Image (cartoon, rainbow, N blue to C red):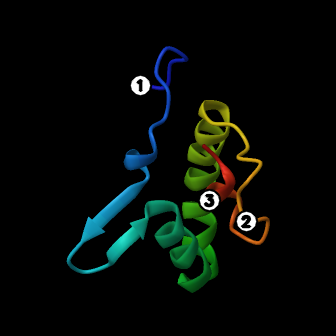
Amino acid sequence: MHGTERRWRQWEAEFTCPCCGEGWARDRLQEALLLLPPKAATELRVRVEGLDLVLLRRTHHEPLADPDSAWWHRRC
C-alpha cells in the first residue's frame, strides 16, 4: 500500500541479516545494481527507481546529514 496516509519509518529501511549483516536495504540494492550483469541490472533498476520515488515522496531532506552520504541516507 503506497497511500499518503502512511509515512515511512526509518526502521523499515534498516535490516539485520545473518548473511548480509546490519545496514540499509537500499545499500544492498545499490551493490546489486553495480554487480549484476547489464540486462539484470537494468531490470532491477526499473523496480528500484519506482521504490525510490515512494521513499522520496514519504520522506524529506535531512539538512544535518553528511552531504557525502548516499541520497537515501540524507532522508528522514
In the image, is 20 to the left or to the right of 33? left
Query: Are circles 2 and 3 on residues that touch, CB within 8 Å?
Result: yes
Q: Residue at left 66%, top 32%?
A: 57
In the image, is 52 to the left or to the right of 64? left
Q: Residue at left 54%, top 62%?
A: 44
Label 2 or label 3, whichever comes before in sequence order:
2
30 or 41, which lies in front?
Answer: 30
Eye-nearest disc, 2 or 3:
2
Q: Which mark is residue 1?
A: 1
When asked about the image quadrant of residue 33, the answer is bottom right
Can you say which quadrant of the picture contains the C terminus? top right
Q: Amino acid at mark 2?
A: Asp
52 or 42, which lies in front?
Answer: 52
Q: Secondary structure beneath disc 2?
A: loop
Is 20 located above or below residue 13 in the figure?
below
Eye-nearest disc, 1 or 2:
2
Query: Residue at label 2?
Result: 66
Query: Residue at label 3?
Result: 73
Q: Amino acid at mark 3?
A: His
Residue 75 percent location from the top left of the image: 65, 48
Is 45 located above or below residue 17 in the figure?
above
Q: Amino acid at mark 1?
A: Met
Question: Which residue lies most toward the front here?
Answer: 64
Residue 58 percent location from the top left of the image: 60, 32
Query: Mark 3 packing: few (<14 Cα in 10 Å), some, or many (20+)?
Result: some
- Label 1 – label 2 distance at C-alpha: 31 Å
